[in-house]
Amino acid sequence: MTERCPLCRQPAAQPYHRDKFRSYHQCAGCALVFVPAEYHLSPADEQAYYELHENSLEDAGYRRFLGRCAEPLLEQLRPRSRGLDFGCGPAPLLARMLVEAGHRVELYDTYFAPDSGAVERDYDFVVATEVVEHLADPAGELQWLWERLRPGGLMALMTKLVISRERFANWHYIRDPTHICFFSVQTFRWLAERFSAELQFAGSDVIFLRKQFA
């Protein structure tokens, strides 16, 4: 039985890997590797798992980690750009770093900053660090975010990439039960084509998609 891809919606995904906790499928169209819905945590269990994270606004190591996205992003932003930190979590350090650099940043997180107004505005940039791997509906949510970007705007994503089936089997990234979508270079190329976006790999797990001017 095939599974329908949550990114491109094609009913052409086939088994990719299985461990003792859940199974994983890969889409034949966009190459997304994903966990079938039957293995997804409930919202309450997902939030409880997130609350176990110990990230802090004062954590120097966390700042260095986020700097892998912030530094190349800041090189491309115009002064006083307006952005959205989507999936900011309970410690929105990336937003603070961007504000420190002179930009305006609003926050949205389903559990920790559920400001519905923030996702109805338009932005010069949207950042989502360690977020897309958690999305049950990546097609809908990424499209929604893309529509928030002004022409010329930048979507900055940070997520670890699928390299091969062999490395996937022993990958620490799949041990997190809230990680349900796994992107690859091929997947982001598909997404860039879908959005008619300029694609840039700004780091080993940092991906920029720029919205073209009409």
Image (cartoon, rainbow, N blue to C red):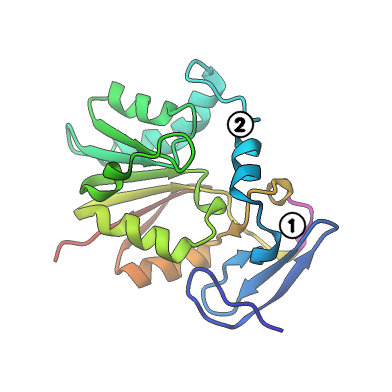
Above or below for 56 versus 18: above
Range of the magenta residues? 166-172
Spatial separation of the CA atoms under disc 2 and disc 1: 29 Å
| Rendering quarter of residue 182 | bottom right
Asked where in the image residue 67 lies, by quadrant, the reply is top left
First reached walking from the N terminus: tag 2 or tag 1: 2
- Does the magenta portion include 169? yes
Amino acid type at mark 1: Arg
- Residue 134 at x, y = what percent? 56, 51
Q: Main secondary structure of the magenta part?
A: helix
Left or right of residue 102: residue 160: right
Q: In the picture provided, is 92 more to the left or to the right than 175? A: left
**Residue marked by disc 2:** 51
* Residue 4 in picture, x, y percent from top left: 58, 77
Give the residue displayed 58% in from the left and 49% down from the top: 160
Nearer the observer, 61 or 87:
87
- Judge whether residue 31 is colored magenta: no
Callout 1 secondary element? helix
| Quarter of the image with the N terminus in it | bottom right
Residue assigned mark 1: 167
Q: Nearer the viewer, residue 2 or 194?
A: 2
Q: Quadrant of residue 88?
A: top left
User: In x, y percent, where is residue 197?
Assistant: 30, 64
Seen as rendered, the residue at the extreme right is 20
Comparing marks 2 and 1, which lies closer to the viewer?
2
For the point 70% across and 60% down, the residue is 39
